[in-house]
Image (tube, grey):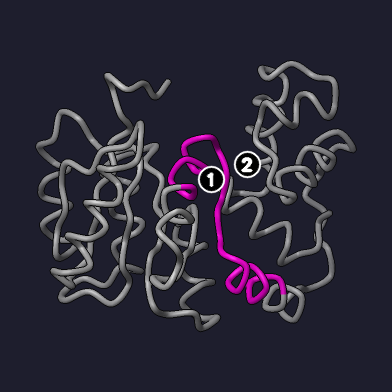
């Protein structure tokens, strides 16, 4: 639980010095959030994660970085800090990069032109179990998956699991899904784990991406 005494830790990986400092100030000024570390490349962030006793809960990640790209860095960052949420924060909005970022494990995707309030709201959203995207990116994602979607595959999802997955696609978090379906949060968590196993994914964003791409709901 985030409190004033123990703010959620947010790291930033951004090679533009001015923008990196600006994002740090924005996060530090937001109640319940703190940005104790920022890096100009993925390599330095991965080295820091290897020795950190207090890994971040969220990483704001640029894609166009020197050395290892942000896209290549996403799975390595997730492996180095299991449970970390990755929000891509970039100028790129082409479909290939969006799709690769989501499939690699990114939890959210925002453009750098996003208002600062939208960025801090996205951090809180992922900490609550959401997958934030601004309107322009969300439309591109929906259009992309509509075009690419093959015929629905049979993954053996039960009717209840399809109902949970449908609400996940709509952006509801576990507590909201539990309330909507009149289930306990523990039961919803069990359904979500079963969905991950049947869809062969490891993250909420991966399950949502697959559901959209293959028209599972």
Overall secondary structure of the magenta stretch? helix
Q: Where is residue 77 in the image (x, y as percent from the top left)?
A: 29, 51
* Residue to which mark 1 is pinned: 203
**Magenta stretch?**
121-142
Q: How crowded is mark 1: few (under 14 residues within 10 Å), some or many (20 or more)?
A: many
Looking at the image, is 86 positioned above or below residue 71?
Answer: above
The residue sitting at 34% across, 41% down in the picture is: 30
Q: In this view, does 153 lie to the left or right of 142?
A: right
Q: Position of residue 45 (x, y in %)?
A: 16, 53
Q: Position of residue 18 (x, y in %)?
A: 16, 69
Q: Which mark is residue 68?
A: none
Looking at the image, is 88 positioned above or below residue 7?
Answer: below
Looking at the image, is 12 positioned above or below residue 97?
Answer: above
Q: Quadrant for the N terminus, please.
A: top left
Does the CB distance between marks 1 and 2 fall below 8 Å? yes
* Closer-to-camera residue (78/177): 177
Callout 2 secondary element: helix
Callout 1 secondary element: loop
Q: Where is residue 99 in the image (x, y as percent from the top left)?
A: 54, 71
Residue 3 is drawn in which quadrant?
top left
Residue 172 is drawn in which quadrant?
top right
Q: Residue 196 carries which label?
A: 2
């Amino acid at each position: 639980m985030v409190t004033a005494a123990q703010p959620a830790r947010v790291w930033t990986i951004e090679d533009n010095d001015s923008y990196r400092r600006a994002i740090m100030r924005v996060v530090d000024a937001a109640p319940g959030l703190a940005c104790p570390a920022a890096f100009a490349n993925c390599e330095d962030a991965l080295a820091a994660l290897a020795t950190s006793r207090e890994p971040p809960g969220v990483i704001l990640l640029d894609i166009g970085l020197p050395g290892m790209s942000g896209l290549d860095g996403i799975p390595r960052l997730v492996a180095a800090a299991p449970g970390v949420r990755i929000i891509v924060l970039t100028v790129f909005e082409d479909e290939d990069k969006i799709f690769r970022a989501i499939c690699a494990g990114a939890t959210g995707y925002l453009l750098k032109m996003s208002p600062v309030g939208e960025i801090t709201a996205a951090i809180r959203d992922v900490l609550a179990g959401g997958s934030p995207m601004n309107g322009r990116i969300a439309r591109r994602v929906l259009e992309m998956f509509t075009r690419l979607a093959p015929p629905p595959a049979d993954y053996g999802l039960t009717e209840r699991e399809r109902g949970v997955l449908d609400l996940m696609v709509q952006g509801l978090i576990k507590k909201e899904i539990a309330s909507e379906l009149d289930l306990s949060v523990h039961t919803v968590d069990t359904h979500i784990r079963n969905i991950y196993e049947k869809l062969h994914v490891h993250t909420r964003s991966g399950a949502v991406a697959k559901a959209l791409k293959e028209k599972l709901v």
